[in-house]
Image (cartoon, helix red, strand yellow):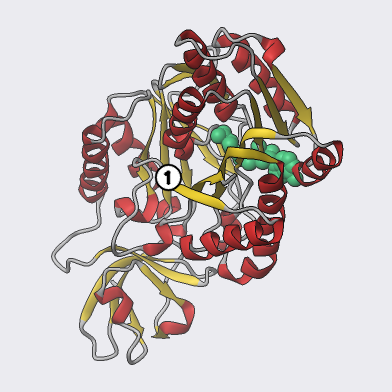
Amino acid sequence: MKSIRLREGKERSLLRRHPWVFEGSIARGSADAGELVRVEAADGRFLAWGAYSPQSAIRVRAWSFDEAERIDAAFFARRIAAALALRARLAIDSDAQRLVHGEADGLPGLIVDRYGDTLVAQFTSAGTERWKAVIADALLQATGLTRLYERSDASVRALEGLEPATGWLRGGPVAGGEAPPVELTIHEHQWQLTLNIAEGHKTGFYLDQRDSRKRFADYARRLGFQRVLNCFCYTGGFSVAALAGMRAAEAEGGAPGGQVVSIDSSGPALERARAHVVLNGFDVNRASFMDADVNASLRQFLKEGQRFDAIVLDPPKFAPTAAHADRAARAYKDINRLALQLLTPGGVLFTFSCSGGISADLFHKIVASAGADAGVDGYILERLGGAPDHPMTLEFPEGEYLKGLVVMRKG
Ligand code: SAH
């Protein structure tokens, strides 16, 4: 067993069960990619079992802080069982769920999403790459499913010195047989949504926004939105939510009509968004789709004097790490300022950041400063986060990547 000896004083984060060891904390020792290592303090005391990653700035990711624990197939089966047990207690209103969320589930570098009876996994660390076959078998065993598709094409793999890898890991086509479908339909709340696990973003869908989409539908119903703008709409999850809420409001005697404008720079995503409107029985004439840049579109709307009574801003990650925070902060502020200006008095903004490098506190400040610049005052009605199948933990604050605010314009 190879040992990794830390420098004096560098044991603190592992003692708090934070699972990362940075390159600069290591005094001596090395191992092969993904190899199991014993991490020890400067005085030789045991700290953790971990996976070594020779090319990554995060040189070791801890598997376990228990010296008596063996890292073997049974270990992975236990961690996966614990992750599934949590989801079973969360009452998630969807057949699409994140089953394993990396560090938060004690499995650094592993993401597993379930879409109906198909699993999709991302292996993003040298450690999970090395244990891939064991993990794949454990996942099938624990879920009773047979199909597992790999989407290890996230850019973070390059930081680990790993090439992208995609395709069926389990349950793929047998010789001469048909390939299982990569085009799937899921049921989220009362809606049907489709995705393509081979071509969609991430593993195909943004499961982390499930609860915020539901919240948005609730607001649309309660406040009777008439003009909704969904920016960075991807496949239109928030657009479907808005239409559902508006339909409910109408059924309860609210004003008929209402329009939802959805913007994204991805043509295929927009096509799917449009299909989702039809699939869920909404009138396509109430939905329009723009293949455009959000920032430019917001400016154009302002020039035209357009106004909306609800706006969603759910941009991609502007700041992957804290090093990008400054530039990202300006980009967030810009779109939030424009959106606040475009809101009618009493209108509602759902604004998000999924940047690990932007804390909830900083995001709040950015939106506040956008309001100041826009000359718009607002109530913060709610703070939002990722759906609970993307758990946050006490010991790994980096897990809180998605944060959102619901702001109502005063006036
Ligand atoms: N709200 C969505 C997820 C949004 S992901 C949901 O609930 O499913 C971010 C989206 O922003 C992606 O679909 C991406 O194509 C789009 N995007 C990235 N940069 C953009 C830009 N400058 N203008 C418009 N869309 C952009």
Residue 167 x, y percent position in the rendering: 55, 33
* Residue 249 at x, y percent in the picture: 49, 16
User: In the image shown, does 352 or 151 lie closer to the viewer?
Assistant: 352
Q: Is residue 197 visible?
A: no
Q: What is the quadrant of the C terminus in the image?
A: top right
User: Within the displayed image, which quadrant is ligand 1 positioned in?
Assistant: top right
Q: In the orientation shown, which residue stands out farthest toward the front?
A: 411
* Whole-percent x, y for residue 110 in the image: 41, 48
Hey, what amino acid is under mark 1? Answer: Gly
Q: Nearer the viewer, residue 279 or 72?
A: 279
Above/below status of 216 relative to 338: above
Q: Nearer the viewer, residue 91 or 347?
A: 347
Q: Secondary structure at mark 1?
A: loop
Q: Mark 1 Cα within 10 Å, few/some/many (few <14, many 20+)?
A: many
Nearest to the observer: residue 120 or residue 191? 191
Asked whether residue 6 is in view, the answer is: yes
Question: Can you tell which quarter of the image residue 145 is in?
Answer: top left
Specify whether 1 is left or right of 146.
left
Residue 105 position, x and y percent, is 31, 50
Mark 1 beta carbon near ligand 1 (under 8 Å): no
Tell me if residue 64 comes above or below residue 31 in the rendering: above
In terms of image quadrants, where is residue 334? bottom right
Q: Quadrant of the N terminus?
A: bottom left
Residue at (23% x, 40% y) in the render: 86
Q: Is residue 383 above or below residue 239?
A: below
- Residue for point 49% across, 63% down: 359
Q: Which residue is mark 1?
A: 386
Q: Residue at x 52, y 36 (%)?
A: 206
| Horizontal relation, residue 69 to residue 111: left or right | left
Q: Residue furthest left?
A: 68
